[in-house]
């Protein structure tokens, strides 16, 4: 019975010692962060046809550049580009609506295009 009590006490002592060892503080050091805080991107909504909306864009992305690429070119459309048709105005966040048009300025209604937006 006395051996059992000594075994239990020894086990508890070992557990206590390991807990104290885990709680030791490590040496001092320095942590350095580098990078930038960036705004979240715009939410996009592509309607059927040639209309594309950008919602909740950060003001720093104003002046973005668009590139339009034909995936499956249509015989009647040689080149396409986007034209700004609506802008919510100044502020921290803004909304814009674009229209996909051909070189004559008419809306494109058929074909597959990839539109790439590059923010400054």
Image (cartoon, rainbow, N blue to C red):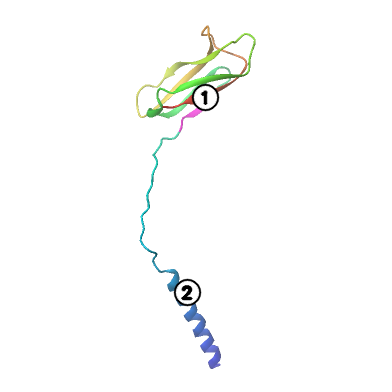
Give the percent coordinates (x, y) of residue 120.
41, 27
Q: Is residue 30 left or right of residue 67?
A: left
The residue that appears at 51% across and 88% down in the rendered structure is 6
- Up-down: is 8 above or below 89? below
Residue at screen point 63% across, 15% down: 73
State the residue at coordinates (35%, 61%): 28
Q: Residues within 10 Å of mark 2 (few under 14, many from 20)?
A: few
Magenta segment, prevailing SS (helix, strand or loop): strand
Quadrant of residue 68 in the image?
A: top right
**Cα distance between the residues tagged 2 and 1:** 58 Å
49 w.r.t. 11: above or below: above
Q: Is residue 9 above or below residue 101?
A: below
* Tag of residue 101: none
Where does residue 104 sit, x and y in percent of width and height? 52, 6
Q: Which of the marked residues, 2 or 1, is nearer the chain's N terminus?
A: 2
Residue 44 falls within the magenta-colored stretch: yes
Q: Crowding at label 1, few (<14), some or many (≥20) Cα neighbours within 10 Å? A: few
Query: Compared with residue 117, is residue 11 higher up or lower down, i.e. above or below?
Result: below
Name which quarter of the figure residue 79 lies in. top right
| Nearest the eye: 20 or 92 | 20
Q: Residue at x 53, y 12 (%)?
A: 101
Image quarter hosting the N terminus: bottom right
- Image position, residue 66 (x, y; %): 48, 21
The tag on residue 116 is 1
Magenta stretch: give its range: 41-46
Q: Secondary structure at mark 2?
A: helix
Asked whether disc 2 touches disc 1, contact meaning CB atoms under 8 Å apart, the reply is no
- Residue 83 in percent (x, y) is at 48, 15
Q: Is residue 43 magenta?
A: yes
The residue where tag 2 is placed is: 18
């Amino acid at each position: 019975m006395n051996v059992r009590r000594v075994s239990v006490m020894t086990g508890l002592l070992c557990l206590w010692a390991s807990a104290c060892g885990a709680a030791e503080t490590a040496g001092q050091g320095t942590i350095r962060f580098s990078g930038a805080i960036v705004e979240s991107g715009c939410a996009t909504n592509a309607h059927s046809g040639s209309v594309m909306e950008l919602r909740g864009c950060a003001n720093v992305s104003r002046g973005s550049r668009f590139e339009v690429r034909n995936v499956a070119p249509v015989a009647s459309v040689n080149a396409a580009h986007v034209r700004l048709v609506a802008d919510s105005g100044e502020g921290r966040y803004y909304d814009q609506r674009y229209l996909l048009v051909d070189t004559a300025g008419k809306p494109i209604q058929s074909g597959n295009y990839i539109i790439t937006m590059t923010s400054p």
